[in-house]
Image (cartoon, rainbow, N blue to C red):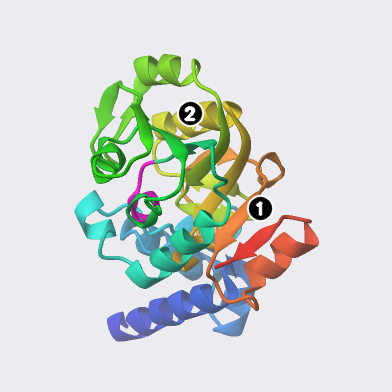
Amino acid sequence: MQRLASERKELLLDRLRVDGRLVAKDMAAELDTSEDTIRRDLRELAVAGLCRRVYGGAIPVAPAAASYARRQEIATTSKHRVAVACLELIQPGSTVILDGGTTALEVARLLPHDLDVTVITHSPTIAVALVDHPAEVFILGGRLFKHSVVASGAAAAEAAAQVSADLFLMGVTGVRPDTGLTTGDVDEAAMKRTLSRRAAQTWVMASEEKIGAASPFPVLRLDEVAGIVSDADPQHPVLAELARADVRVLQA
């Protein structure tokens, strides 16, 4: 029985990766088992961090629960492609808010030295990466949220409210039409919203593993950002849904 349960869970995960969503009722019919059995499987997979339960089934979990050091090793090629595409959005002479996170760090590393730009960031990691760059760099301070190595809390939000920018390159851990833009910490989500309000445009950096995934805390609706920068396959079903919702996607 345990072997059968293990096989069933593996099938559920495979289907989740392909379809981007599971409906417990449909899977129960397909596997000729009870909905209670499928729901129990999904609960156990969710406890293991392998999916996220939603009403009636499950959706993929965002991969960003790992430590910052571990996330630097995840999808590095994908993040590089997204970072390169993001450079197209940065205009000479502009002011850019650069979020924390590993994709934003790649943007900082790739920023051309002959590009006249001002960077505002609440990430000490991003600031240090730009020490040898001629860009003007402003750091927003606050309580250090160690998971993402960014400033957070009331002090950081107050500092963010005093700045203005042309562009905010925002990182998230999940992009879905039904859940919108999500991340894994409530304070981090609030800080991203504050920073977005301080920029004329917000573009979302979403490497392929973020597309179709979801985290617990909503950041913004998809219609509140200028667009998504992603290297996910153009045939990805979630990208097709975004296109039908008139969400701009810059293909990396």
Secondary structure, mark 2, is: helix
Residue bounds of the magenta highlight: 100-107
Q: Position of residue 211 (x, y in %)?
A: 54, 63
Query: For this rendering, which residue is in front, 167 or 46?
Result: 167
| Distance in Å between CA atoms under marks 1 and 2 | 20 Å
On the rendered structure, is 125 left or right of 205?
left
Query: What type is the residue that disc 1 sits on?
Result: Asp
Asked if residue 66 is among those painted magenta in the image, a careful observer would answer: no
Magenta: main secondary structure: helix
Q: Position of residue 144 (x, y in %)?
A: 25, 29
Quadrant in the picture for the N terminus: bottom left
Dot 1 alpha-carbon crowd within 10 angstroms: few under 14, some 14 to 19, many 20 or more: few
Residue for badge 1 = 178
> Mark 1 or mark 2, which has the lower sequence index?
1
Query: For this rendering, which residue is in front, 68 or 39?
Result: 68
Query: For this rendering, which residue is in front, 200 or 9?
Result: 200
Query: What type is the residue that disc 2 sits on?
Result: Ala
